[in-house]
Image (cartoon, rainbow, N blue to C red):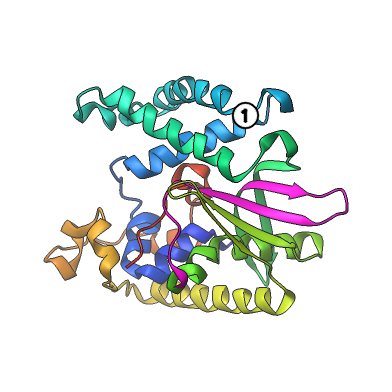
Amino acid sequence: MTPALSPSRASDFKQCPLLYRFRTVDRLAEPPSPAAARGTLVHAVLEELFELPAHERTPERAVQLVAPRWRALVELEPALAELPAAEEDGDKRWLDQAGALVRRWFELEDPTRLEPAERELYVEADVDGLVLRGYIDRLDVAPTGEVRIVDYKTGRCPDERFEGKALFQLRFYALVLWRLRGAVPDLLQLVYLGDGRVLRYSPDEADLLAVERNIKAVWAAIERAARTGDWRPRTSTLCRWCDFQELCPEFGGTPPPLPITAATLALEPSVAGATPSDRGACVPTP
């Protein structure tokens, strides 16, 4: 067994150990999230846009990609079709909302001047016996060699109090790239399409070593919970968005019995925990 951790699962445990258990050990199904589905759709459109010649990467062309990409996603996951159906003119409204987010991106970056080195890049590195892995939305490499990690978010930029939490995912990826390539990425960039803001951060070795220590501490806590079976909940304002309230003791619920293989599942999360499908939407901040 190779212990492995993605930034999304690390964030789950930091937010609430019981949430980590429900997603990683019990692997409970969650209803499709409108915000996550919209994020997946927008990500798919922006990725496909870079398949076109630079002069064709216009807002109008990008919006034309929204409907066919949505149909392709629904074919892969039919339950997604139910998300816009609850509203009158739901499909049109849904596609218009996604199109507006795509158009906003053009106010923040000029794709005619960008040629990403990588898109939807899967990265994986062994850090003292723990595999860190995940998907990077976009990796830019300047002609002079500078490296920029870019991540798209369809929500709004958090205020300064929560910037560190928002940047955790990119700092995680920066650590992985540093361990893989031996050089610290020059810039981390979060592009928030919900309000048209860009959050930038330049890491250094000391910063990434601190991230590594934090991840190791999180993993040690996960190992302890796996060994003891103690996945106690941690309440916060984020509980209001949790799909598992009816199973949470803090809300009068009872978790399902732990699987026999619980300890193994807890220490070897499925790579699905790092796939693009759960990216793009912002986790609400308190």
Quarter of the image where the C terminus is located: bottom left
Q: Residue at x 34, y 30 (%)?
A: 94
Percent x, y for residue 4? 56, 61
Q: Is 277 left, or right, of 186 in this rendering?
A: left
Percent x, y for residue 249? 17, 68
Q: Residue at x 42, y 54 (%)?
A: 156
In the image, what residue type sits under mark 1? Leu
Q: How many marks?
A: 1
Percent x, y for residue 2? 60, 60
Q: Is residue 256 visible?
A: no
Percent x, y for residue 73? 44, 27
| Residue projecting furthest to the front | 107
Q: Residue at x 21, y 62 (%)?
A: 255
Is residue 157 rendered magenta in the image? yes
Residue hosting label 1: 49
Q: Secondary structure at mark 1?
A: helix
Circle 1 Cα neighbour tier, 10 Å, few/some/many (<14 / 14–19 / ≥20): many
Q: Quadrant of residue 129?
A: bottom right
Q: Is 122 left, or right, of 223 in this rendering?
A: right
Picture layout, residue 251 above or below residue 227: above
Picture layout, residue 193 above or below residue 177: above
Quarter of the image where the N terminus is located: bottom right
Picture layout, residue 104 above or below residue 96: below
| Residue projecting furthest to the left | 252
Residue closer to the observer: 191 or 39: 191
Residue closer to the observer: 38 or 259: 38
Q: Residue at x 55, y 41 (%)?
A: 105
Is residue 151 rendered magenta in the image? yes
User: Which range is magenta?
Assistant: 137-160
